[in-house]
Image: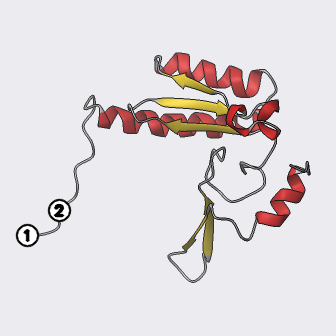
Amino acid sequence: MVQCSDALVWELVKNNSSFMKKVNGRTSRSGSIRFSVEKGNVKNISSYKYSGFNSKTVDVAATADNRAALSAKSSKASTQPSKGQPVTPLNKSFRKVEKTITSQVADNYYRPDLKSEALARYSAIYRGNRVAKSVKKGVPVKKGRS
């Protein structure tokens, strides 16, 4: 495979990608919003900063057993894609996981700009998993007049 810069890859795929989801705005002013569902995109926004095509990406994802996993792209990603994103399971207490995410993302100068996004993503996954495990009850659906 030919090596090329991350910026060039982004310029080629930013308008046409199989991972892109376009959502129309609710009003005529807001326009459409472009989301991206690619692996490595921590905020699911279609922009170069959050793109999974960068050489350094961070992703927090939910697993099948109602837990979470942190993956960060390593230097092997360009030559060995299957080994390029090692996965760190996040199955400790909330405080310990917060410390793990901070140490992996910001403290070792990997992508300190994505620290708050990764923590926000884990927080949302943690809340959803608590409801899925029946530790906490979900918000009841509002019923209209009957």
Determine the secondary structure under disc 2: loop
Which residue occupies the foreground of this view, 126 or 89? 89
Badges 1 and 2: C-beta atoms under 8 Å apart? yes
**Image quadrant containing the C terminus:** bottom left
Residue 121: image quadrant is top right
- Where residue 32 sits in the image (x, y, percent)? 61, 74
Tell me if 125 is positioned left or right of 24 in this view.
left
- Where residue 14 sits in the image (x, y, percent)? 76, 65
Amino acid type of the residue that numbered disc 1 sits on in the rendered structure: Ser
Q: Name the residue under label 1.
A: 146
Amino acid type of the residue that numbered disc 2 sits on in the rendered structure: Lys
With respect to residue 77, does 10 lie above or below?
below
> Residue at left 50%, top 76%?
26
With respect to residue 28, does 32 lie above or below?
above
Image label count: 2
Outermost residue to the front: 1
Disc marking residue 143? 2
Tell me if 26 is positioned left or right of 87 in this view.
left
> Residue at left 63%, top 52%?
38
